[in-house]
Image (cartoon, rainbow, N blue to C red):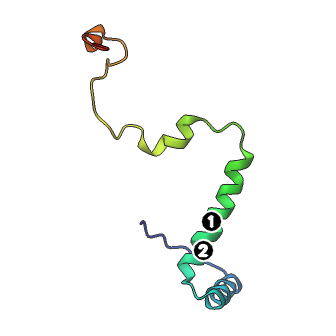
């Protein structure tokens, strides 16, 4: 999990503390839950989301031949 530091208005911090105490959860859990809910709603409303958008953080992480889709030598023996 990645750590993020941010500045909050005191009133918002008090709200987070109140909810965390009420639910018996950590402040981090409450903030993560709120972010997931908000970002999930944004994602649902975006009908133009592409496959690339969903895997953008993975692009360029793998390795392999650069001509895999165009070089016929990689198809030799395929399907046998």
Label 1 Cα neighbours within 10 Å, binned few <14 / some 14-19 / many ≥20: few
Residue 27 x %, y %? 56, 82
Judged left or right of residue 35, residue 1 is left
Residue 10 x %, y %? 66, 86
Q: Which mark is residue 26?
A: none
Q: Which SS class for mark 1? A: helix
Quarter-of-image position of residue 65? top left
Q: Is residue 7 at least partly visible in the picture?
A: no
Label 2 Cα neighbours within 10 Å, binned few <14 / some 14-19 / many ≥20: few
At 42% from the left edge and 66% from the top edge, which residue is drawn?
2
At 65% from the left edge and 69% from the top edge, which residue is drawn?
34
* Residue holding disc 2: 31
User: Where 39 falls versus 6 (above or below)?
Assistant: above
Q: Which SS class for mark 2? A: helix
At 65% from the left edge and 83% from the top edge, which residue is drawn?
16
Q: Residue furthest front?
A: 80
Q: CA distance from mark 1 to mark 2?
A: 6 Å
At 50% from the left edge and 73% from the top edge, which residue is drawn?
5
Proximity of marks 1 and 2: CB atoms separated by less than 8 Å? yes
Q: Is residue 22 at least partly visible in the picture?
A: yes
Judged left or right of residue 60, residue 6 is right
């Amino acid at each position: 999990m990645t750590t993020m530091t941010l500045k909050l208005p005191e009133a918002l911090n008090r709200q987070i503390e109140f909810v965390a105490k009420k639910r018996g959860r950590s402040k981090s859990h409450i903030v993560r839950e709120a972010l997931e809910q908000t970002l999930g709603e944004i994602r649902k409303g975006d009908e133009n989301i592409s496959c690339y958008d969903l895997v953008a953080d993975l692009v360029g992480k793998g390795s392999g031949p650069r001509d895999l889709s165009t070089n016929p030598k990689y198809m030799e023996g395929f399907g046998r």
